[in-house]
Amino acid sequence: MISYFNLEGIDCDHASTGPHGLELALSNYYEAILLDINLPRMNGLEICEALRHQGVDVPVLMLTARDTLEDKLAGFNAGTDDYVVKPFELSELTARVKALAQRRSSRSKKLKVGPLVLDLSLRVATREDRQISLTPTGWKLLELLMRESPNVVSREKMVNTIWSGVDYPNSNSLKVHLYRLREQVDKPFSEKLLHTIANHGVVIRESND
């Protein structure tokens, strides 16, 4: 499978046990994660659930020989994004992995960028254990930036996400909300997480300096 992925231009790491797979997933940045439900010492469902509780929003594709509705529901309840039953064609598996890699998962219960945490279940934002009070628009903006991190988010995408289906208030509205977000997320702390990339947009990530 790894050789086939490599031929398709997909670079990947491999773990033969559940704990090793969880360690790799938590210590590296991946565009997609492929889990076998029957991994030894820690199964794929347990790994996926642990990743979602840790705030990892990388899309997860689960492999299994089980084809019952109950098993599939268990996978989705654990935070799986897609499900492939064995046996399968490698070409189909590759196509699904590539499709998942184009987006972030919406199944994570927490989003994390360095010390900044967005708890989606509790609707609470914290940085260094200090709670941040956000307006509904501020929450939408921060959630978008954190889901896309470490990628830059264009002004157009921010506007379309925040004001989807309604008229954009005015040309300064986004600037005002970004200013407020910087005041809340960055100003009380020594390290800046929000960065403006000229002619591209805004990104939230830890500094590389």
Image (cartoon, rainbow, N blue to C red):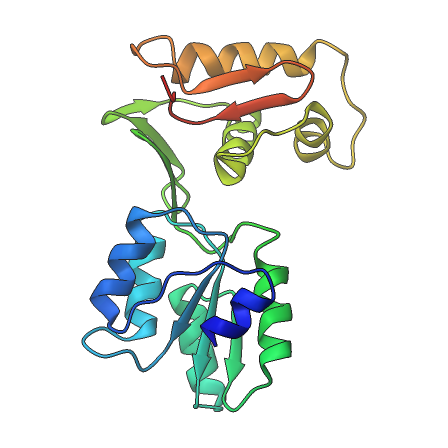
Viewed as shown, does residue 129 lie left or right of 184?
Answer: left
Measured from the top left, where is residue 177 in percent x and y? 58, 15
Q: Is residue 131 above or below residue 8?
A: above
Residue situated furthest left in the rendering: 41
Please report the residue visible at 24 percent of the width from the left and 56 percent of the height from the top: 23
Task: Give residue 152's quadrant in the image.
Answer: top right
Viewed as shown, does residue 38 lie left or right of 19?
Answer: right
Nearest the viewer among 64 and 118 is 64
Q: Is residue 35 above or below residue 206?
A: below
Measured from the top left, where is residue 73 in percent x and y? 46, 77
Nearest the viewer among 73 and 33 is 33
Q: Is residue 160 above or below residue 186?
A: below
Number of marks = 0
Measured from the top left, where is residue 195 in percent x and y? 50, 17
Nearest the viewer among 9 and 174 is 9
Viewed as shown, does residue 11 lie left or right of 113?
Answer: right
